[in-house]
Image: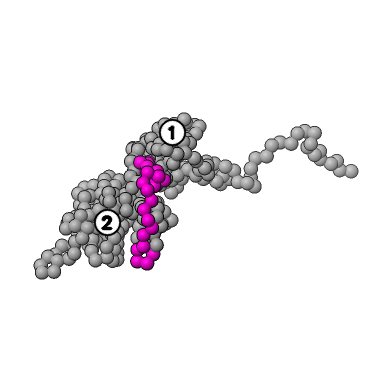
Amino acid sequence: MEKFFSHAFGNIFEAGILHDPELDLPADAPRSAPQSFQVCGEDSITVVLGWDKAEADLFLELHTPGGAVLTAGSAGIEDSSGRTWTFLRVPLPHGSERDGTWQAVAVRPGGGGEFPPPSPALRFFVNVIPSGGVRLLRVQDAKRYYTGDSINPMVYLRYGDGGWPANAEVTLTVSVPDTSIGNVLTREKLHAAATVDGDTIPAPQATLAALEAASGKPVVGYTEQTFKLEDDSASTEGKFESGGVLGLPIDGGGQLHLPREGDVRAGPMHGAARARLVGPRRHRHRPRPDRHDHDGYQSRCRDDRPRPARPLWKQRRPRERR
């Protein structure tokens, strides 16, 4: 639930999400591995840490590109905490530091003695929510795709004033399932329905739960494939200029390696695009008062759209005054 509200806050009020991993902290481990993320021109960052067990506690450390360590007690840092979450908001630049590689670290509270704080294994997430800077957005696509169809996952980069960065690099990581639930249930014989706390678990769900318990891992695994998006005309469906738009036609039956097992195909795929800005140049957009700009395309207002000239024989002649 904390992660849902973090995503909603970032997508509605700020510039989206910069970093979004879900990780495990082993029991008795004092701190997590550093999670790196890039900052490039943002006005502030809000780093949210959430975990799954209320009996445990975690703190958040931020490491700046210059090596300084920021915590809730650092000057100029806004913070707040709950039973299973905490966040730090850092205005940028902070101590003359802004652009570069930052790191977030989840840290257990210190202490020991006769009654040390509990340190169970935890599942936690880190969200980095930027304010200002460039936004990575998806070009709207109303098409309906089926198995084997080609797809072009186009995205575009925009600053708040409508400009876009030059020399941006965007990669798309696609998580592809290695099998499908239908294939698993076809190979395995259905187990009997189970009862848990008075609730009946249907046979398919009971079978999947038994398989996961026996193997110690999910019945459906995922593999990742990475594609680099380009801004040339062939990759952006014929656009003559980039305008901050990048894409790549992906052949669902060729480039995207999908499992082919029987008649039942794999389940849903998930994609995440990440952008890296290279170079300081920035294109400025100056809107004209008679035009609206949306997703990089310009169009006239409806009441001001150009109309074709009327043929001469249809044009009205001015009446002569008598």
Q: Is residue 155 above or below residue 96?
A: above
Q: Amino acid at mark 2?
A: Arg
Specify start and end residues of the magenta stretch as a single range.
Answer: 174-199
Q: How many marks?
A: 2
What residue do we see at 31% from left, 57% from top? 48
**Residue 32 spot, x, y in % from top left:** 21, 53
Q: Is residue 34 visible?
A: yes
Name the residue tied to disc 1: 253
Left or right: residue 145 compared with residue 270: right
Figure coloring: one colour
Label 1 neighbour load within 10 Å: few <14, some 14-19, many 20+: few
Residue 192 within the segment the image draws in magenta: yes
Under circle 2, the secondary element is strand
Under circle 1, the secondary element is loop
Q: Nearer the viewer, mark 1 or mark 2?
A: 1
Q: Answer with mark 1 or mark 2, whichever residue precedes in sequence.
A: 2
Question: Toward the viewer: 298 or 182?
Answer: 182
Indicate which disc residue 123 carries.
2
